[in-house]
Image: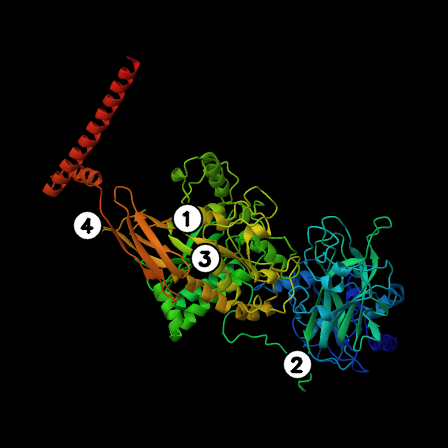
Amino acid sequence: MAGVLHFILLLFLHCGSFILISAGPEDGTTTVDSDAAFTTTESLFSAGRTNASEVPTTGFTASYSKLTTKPPTTTTTTERLTGDTGKTAERAVSGKDAEEEKEQEGPLELERRSTRSIKVAKKPKTIQKKPKLITKKPKVVTKAKPQVKKSASPPVATEKVPQCPPLGLESLKVKDNQLRASSFKRKGLGPHRGRLNIQSGIEDGDIYDGAWCAQYRDKKQWLEVDARQLTRFTGVILQGRNSIWSWDVVHTYKVQFSNDSLVWKPCMNGTEEAVFEGNQDAETPVLALFNTSAVARYIRINPQTWYQNGTDGDICLRAEVLGCTLPDPNNIYAWQTQPAESRDKLDFRHHNYKEMKKLMKSVNEACPDITRIYSIGKSYTGLKLYVMEISDNPGKHELGEPEFRYVAGMHGNEVLGRELLLNLMQYICQEYKRGDQRIVHLVKETRIHLLPSMNPDGYEMAFKKGSELSGWALGRYSYEGIDMNHNFADLNSVMWTAIELETDRSKLINHYFPIPEQYTSEEAFVASETRAVINWMQDIPFVLSANLHGGELVVTYPYDMTRDWAPREHTPTSDESFFRWLSTAYASTNQVMSNPDRRPCHNKDFLRYNNIINGADWHNVPGSMNDFSYLHTNCFEVTVELSCDKFPHASELPMEWENNRESLLIYMEQVHRGIKGVVRDKDTEAGIADAIIKVDDIDHHIRSVADGDYWRLLNPGEYRVTASAEGYYPSSRTCQVMYDHYPTICDFRLTKMPKQRLKEILAKGGKIPKDLQLRLRQLRLRKLRVTTKAMNQRRAAAAAKRAKRV
């Protein structure tokens, strides 16, 4: 009988699948592990079967789509063990224990959390006929210490699916001409729109719709992706159609592979063609991992069922394909080889909160003389908002040295800015130690502040889902559900209301607008993170800043809010020309933005605007940090949208660093553009705080800080500049701004007004100097003459009236 069982087992193995039978020593019952049945990897370029690459699986954290066959009731993985006796046994390891053994270090981007549902090849009934024969010797395996060895039988164990990144439909790495479809309703719903997370325009029917939609409603429709070279495909991620007006999702679908786009081979589930579960809503990405990876060049997604909506339901989907490009030893595809690595040795991966803090600490330990870590506050859940300061004198504001800041992670799911700032602090530390003169000069002449995560709570939510699976909005908001990009005080409305009500323009202010009282109250719906950043702005005299976002490729500048609450309208500041200079400095040096052949990310072609745009001309954003920074402080700030993909895969981070490294450095260097100087007291040489710096023909002033130093960002040109302060006579001079990468020095020495000088002397209990006494006497005489003249004029006028009456 043992020989019969051995023959049956070999038969199962020969068929490419096996059934795990385990028997308890006490009750003699048998269980069938349907998850143990897996087929081996099939290459479409060979007649036989090939083993899968033994690469550990990346972590996916979202639930992936299951096959439509009945799911297994147990979740176990199996290991083939061979003892000294030469007999093989099967050991079941629970999925939960296996999960606990693996500690998560990086982002859970592409994790398989459970095994796939596989159809059992044989009925359990036929296996349960001879339970006693299987349970005769349960102790044989337990006595001998098993050793993991390669089985002499055909490979039947579970395939370890390779750690394969997305091909790049979402990130636009896959070009439009690599996408084909069986049909499409119109150009705006063509195959080039079938990209994961792509966003539609406001109106349906334009060229920027939110999915690929087939023209016909049958099971013969497909979306095809050409990888352009041999690729090991491991899975598909699907979404429904992004639209304000339509609801279209694919419920189930099949997948086929090909080498020539003519002969297609289906993705199999045992002996049947696999059918994968799709979407139940339009926005949640659903992952389907193949039971076995397949090597091919082309892959097709073939919808089977979809939301009917009566008779109006369309076949629409957005997708991402997971696959590993195979090695190309013969250099056949050299024409399309793209560099995937950076020349800089940096930590290119996604960092959660603990890992971010650890990395920042390592940078501080590597460069303790030029770095300092400090916190500006806490998030709603208590995570600290850490800032890395980089300067030749950390912790100290130096006279004449401008303050610069980068802020990232305002929206927690827009993660590229976070990783770029972590890379930037590593890079500056390394290059400073290496003696790079550009970096050395930047560190010695600038005080740099890097806030990599303004919304750590939102990031942690997106991080747990991981790249490709967090969708478009998960993690965008704070833990309380606040969009921090609309959470700053609306000073624009305060300014425009004052302009409409005040008839005397000389009484209007154009800078340092106070924060409304209702905003500062405890009852105000203001995020703790927003309050922390506002206090940070008020404590440090920042000159220039950039707010790093994701989801587009463009640089926007103030104002972000339209004056009449229009959906979009060009709303410039008085410093429009310099903001355009700043925006162009970043956009023109960014390798992706400056590429004239790139396609639009979603629904607006910013190439027509040279990749820069007035924020309000894009869409109305009241309460933005850019506008608040400009109206409440001296700081000029722009928003940089870094990539089409909000959460790029870790494999794309090296190239994203290469795309943005020069832009990040160039933009920081713009803080030295314009004029700077110190406003001093002419008599004491002490710096004058809060002195107003006015530039003719620019209706926006700035102020000097505590030590009297100031920085006024200006384009090259000649300017008439006036410095004034309370109790002092104003002083004016002409300043010339050159094209050089250093500012023009324009110092001011102000003379106190006699009254102010007298008040200060009397307050100190001192004697009035003779020159001041003489000056006061002259002022009294002048005032007396003016008063006497006015009285005489009034008397003459009254006499004339009396004479006229007589």
Left or right: 728 as drawn, with respect to 640: left
Look at label 1 and name its amino acid.
His
Who comes first in sequence, dot 2 or dot 3?
2
Question: How far from the left and from the top, in percent, is residue 552?
Answer: 60, 59
Left or right: 434 as drawn, with respect to 400: right
Q: Which residue is mark 1?
A: 700
Which of the two discs, 2 and 3, sits closer to the camera? 3
Left or right: 731 as drawn, with respect to 595: left
Nearer-the-camera pick, 565 or 53: 565
The span from disc 1 to disc 4 (Cα, nearest Å) is 29 Å
Which of the two discs, 1 and 4, sits closer to the camera? 1
CB contact under 8 Å: marks 2 and 3: no
Look at label 3 and name its amino acid.
Phe
Nearer-the-camera pick, 765 or 203: 203
**Secondary element type, mark 3:** helix
Who comes first in sequence, dot 1 or dot 4?
4
Q: How is the image coloured?
A: rainbow
Nearer-the-camera pick, 231 or 407: 407
Question: How far from the left and from the top, in percent, is residue 479?
Answer: 56, 47
Q: Which residue is mark 4?
A: 684
Crowding near the residue tagged with mark 3, few <14, some 14–19, many ≥20 C-alpha atoms within 10 Å: some
Q: Which residue is mark 3?
A: 578
Q: Which residue is mark 2?
A: 335
Establish if 754 lies above or below 552: above
The span from disc 4 to disc 2 (Cα, nearest Å) is 70 Å
Crowding near the residue tagged with mark 2, few <14, some 14–19, many ≥20 C-alpha atoms within 10 Å: few
Q: How many marks?
A: 4
Farthest residue, direction bottom: 330
Q: Which mark is residue 29?
A: none
**Secondary element type, mark 1:** loop
Who comes first in sequence, dot 3 or dot 4?
3
